[in-house]
């Protein structure tokens, strides 16, 4: 573990992840688990959010109490699987702004191709959390972060469920300033670009496609 990579080893996260990896877990359960685990991961990825104080009155006395400072944070879903992480995080941070980056992976070159980009305003003043369940080759994640930086984002974090060593290395090379939070660092990628042992295609498993 380093400043660049945080693996959330909390037993609840690890237990839910094991259930999600199991190929016999249903689509409905996978989706519910993803919602729950996204909240636990969001807790970690927002740990360094800036706070200020506000004067309030408790029933007993006045106090200066902590509140979040600055602009609302921006969540950016990397389509389509990133959407599976949104609902849970938005329950926890309902005022977050939400953006979408659409990248598909060319199955032959494994390189990302952009087809959609819609981002909140004033990204330079927000904590920006890019979400994608699977950090595999890292090519689409690095390309998504390129887009966020081009749109002005300066304080970016990357949240995923599973990471492969190849993806972490690629992100560290391209974006050493973007910390990654994940539930597990798996062994490797296979020849098709899937994370092993992994959980299969995250989009297919959460949406019940294929
Ligand atoms: N995307 C997925 O959904 N699964 C993988 O294993 C790799 C990339």
Image (cartoon, helix red, strand yellow):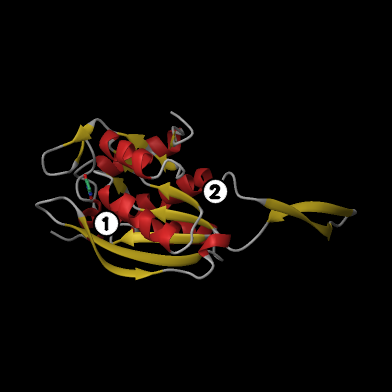
Q: Which residue is mark 1?
A: 206
Picture disc at residue 151 = none
Please rate how many residues cluster around mark 2, counting C-alpha atoms within 10 Å: few if below 14, some from 14 to 19, many from 20.
some
Q: Which residue is mark 2?
A: 46
Q: Quadrant of the C terminus?
A: bottom left
Q: Closer to the N terminus: mark 2 or mark 1?
A: 2
**Which element carries disc 2, helix, strand or loop?**
loop
Left or right, residue 200 beside residue 81: left
Q: Indicate the position of residue 115 as horizontal and vertical percent values.
A: 25, 68
Cβ of mark 2 under 8 Å from ligand 1: the answer is no
Q: Residue at x 47, y 56 (%)?
A: 89
Q: Indicate the position of residue 112 as horizontal and vertical percent values.
A: 22, 56
Q: Indicate the position of residue 76 as horizontal and vertical percent values.
A: 41, 60
Whether residue 174 is visible to the viewer of this picture, yes or no, is: yes
Locate residue 196: give its quadrant. top left
Left or right, residue 182 beside residue 201: right
Q: In the depicted view, which residue is nearer to us: 30 or 48? A: 48
Q: Residue at x 54, y 67 (%)?
A: 122
């Amino acid at each position: 573990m380093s400043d660049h990579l945080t693996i959330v080893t909390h037993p609840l996260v690890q237990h839910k992840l094991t259930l999600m990896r199991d190929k016999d877990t249903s689509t409905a359960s996978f989706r519910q688990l993803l919602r729950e685990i996204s909240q636990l991961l969001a807790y970690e990825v927002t740990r360094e959010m800036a706070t200020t104080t506000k004067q309030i009155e408790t029933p007993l006395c006045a106090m200066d109490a902590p509140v979040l400072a600055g602009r609302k944070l921006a969540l950016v879903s990397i389509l389509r699987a990133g959407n599976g992480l949104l609902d849970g995080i938005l329950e926890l941070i309902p005022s977050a702004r939400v953006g979408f980056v659409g990248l598909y992976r060319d199955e032959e070159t494994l390189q990302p191709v952009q087809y959609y980009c819609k981002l909140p305003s004033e990204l330079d003043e927000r904590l920006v959390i890019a979400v994608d369940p699977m950090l595999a080759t890292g090519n689409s994640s690095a390309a998504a972060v390129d887009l966020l930086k081009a749109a002005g984002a300066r304080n970016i974090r990357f949240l995923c469920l599973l990471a492969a060593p190849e993806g972490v290395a690629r992100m560290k090379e391209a974006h050493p300033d973007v910390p990654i939070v994940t539930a597990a660092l798996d062994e490797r990628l296979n020849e098709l670009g899937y994370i092993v042992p992994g959980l299969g295609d995250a989009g297919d498993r959460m949406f019940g496609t294929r």
